[in-house]
Image (cartoon, rainbow, N blue to C red):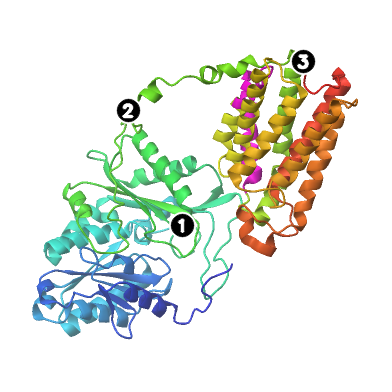
Amino acid sequence: MKKLINNVDGIVDDMIDSLVLSNQHLKRVDQYHVVVRADCGEKVNDNKVKLISGGGSGHEPCHAGFVGRGMLCAAVLGDVFVSPSPKHIVEAIKAVANHSQQARDTGCLLIVKNYTGDRLNFGIAKEIAVNEYGIAVDMVVVDDDVSVLMNDSVVNKDTKRRGIAGTPLVHKVLGALAERGNSLHDIVQYYHKYLCPTASNNLATLGVALSSCTIPAIGNPTFEIKEQEIEFGLGIHGEPGAYTTKMTTSKEIVKNILDHLVKYIDNSNDKDIVVLVNNLGSTSTMEQMIVVKDTIEYLHGLDYKIHRLLSGHFVTSLEMSGISISILSIKDKDTLTLLDSNTTATAWPINGLLCPIAKGESVNLKYNNQSTTSSTSTDDKYSKLKSIKVSKQHGELIKGLVHRCCKDLIDSNQLLTDLDSKVGDGDLGTTMERASNGVLKEIDSIPFEHPCFAFRVLSNILSDTLGGSTGPFYSIFFMKLANTMYQRCTSNGTNEPQPMDWGLALVEGQNAIQELGKSKKGDCTMLDALVPAIESIESSVSKQQHDTITLVQIFEEAYKASEQGAQSTIDMISKMGRSSYLGDRSKNVMDPGACCISIIFKSLFNSIKEYNNTNKVNSELLT
């Protein structure tokens, strides 16, 4: 897997330097992997307990991101996924609590995640600090991971529960107590009574991953997850989880996580909880937001009261794709006050500690607005367009053309996606399929014997379903097509469009796209296929006044023109749209928008040809 940073030598030093260079409130203990609050040596803080945490790197923003007033006083960082040595931990303790007798007496609390290396190294550092420097030091071990409890083959399960994403909640609550001035003894007691996972059953975490992570020094994923599988109940060091299961929906994944979590949470009192949704590294924000939604809705269904919600990166595992969910059961109302208290730690989400809505509370904003409460239906707004009619036979033909185009665009999803992936964002095939399905969903309710009205309805559907930059172009084309044809018919005193009306309406639709997009033929866009096709139709309509030319011939020529136009974009350098940013790199690829137009005209031609063979459509253009 590619890495932006491939030089592992000095990676921790560089990361620490980044932190202190970008934040004047942080300092580094010279020659050690220790980040401290810059004000920890000030006498005014000597009567406050100093909180220190740490562990291997690769879990950012934990731990250094939680150094700040109201949380940690120092963080000790080891190499990637490697516990820091006692030497570095002792230097952290000395840096924050060895500058005065009052500071040594007030003491230091080590918050350690339950991994063997962390427990041993922090434990040794504690003994050194107490016995050699006379500093009061205590230690609490966070073991919020409940995945090990799901594995029947593991012995002594309680001792093997790892410390994972619930740890920052401990940092915040205990840090607020320290800032308040509580003693070391009181803070430790509060932890065991209200936070300690195994002592109080008030904190539990469980995670899933879709991919492993790659340790820079190794260069390969620590384990493999198949395409249609997820790893359930894993730690934060790239190790496999409790078991592998089939990939499923986010709702089902969240349900499985929460069903396990609530087994271990003490619900003896009211179901008052705090929820933390943690990104393990590379889960997209969109995916995480959906997980948050599913989490809130499922917990509401279980009658839990979510008093606070946190979502984001707290304890990551390098670039692992996955999430974990932590639940903290609130047994002391002061816990919420402590969570809400101020901190200067950069990674704690001051404006992201949210109070979710209560179960049953509406999420919709309702307001009175005359324009919305008295809004008219589509039929009412465009009823005048219904005055323009074609025969029932031609109405069925138009419907058939639209239906065939939608089907062919859906079938062309992969082709359009492949082209768009080379010069755009790769979503054209998907968006055209979505729009086509939107049209097909409504097609039986659209009165195509009233073409102006039908095209206006299609304009609305395409505007709603296409989105992006493609939607407005297709939408305005059909809007202009409808309005131009209506205006020509009414000005001519007829309610039935003539061939020239169709030809000129198509030209106006094409012109509307050019005006909206500020583009023209030759810019390597959809217009390079659309303009030749419509020019061909307009020319054929003009010829039809003097020569015998069939509808099949008209659209055969239009299709050929659109295909030639689309092919011409292969040699062009794009001047408009996303591909215009590529310069020469946009050459040798057919413009996806032009390809889409050629697919549409090929579909129109084939549909008319088949319809003609069955129904013997006359030579007049939709009259």
Q: Which residue is mark 1?
A: 234
How far, Cα to Cα, is label 2 from label 1?
46 Å
Residue at x 74% of width, y 30% of height: 503
Amino acid type, callout 2 = Tyr
Residue drawn at x 37%, y 69% is 116
Residue 530 point in image, percent of width and height: 73, 41
- Direction from residue 457 to residue 498 in the image, left or right: right
By secondary structure, the bulk of the magenta-drawn segment is best described as: helix
Q: Residue at x 51, y 60 (%)?
A: 240
Q: Magenta region: which residues?
A: 427-456
Q: In the rendered image, which residue does mark 2 sit on?
A: 367
Q: Quadrant of the C terminus?
A: top right
Q: Identity of the amino acid at label 1?
A: Leu
Residue that carries the numbered disc 3 in the rendered image: 393
**Residue 406 visible in this rendered orientation of the protein:** no
Find the distance from the CA under tag 1 to the CA under tag 3: 64 Å
Q: CA distance from mark 2 to mark 3?
A: 46 Å
Q: Dot 3 lies on which element? A: helix
Q: Is residue 497 above or below residue 126?
A: above
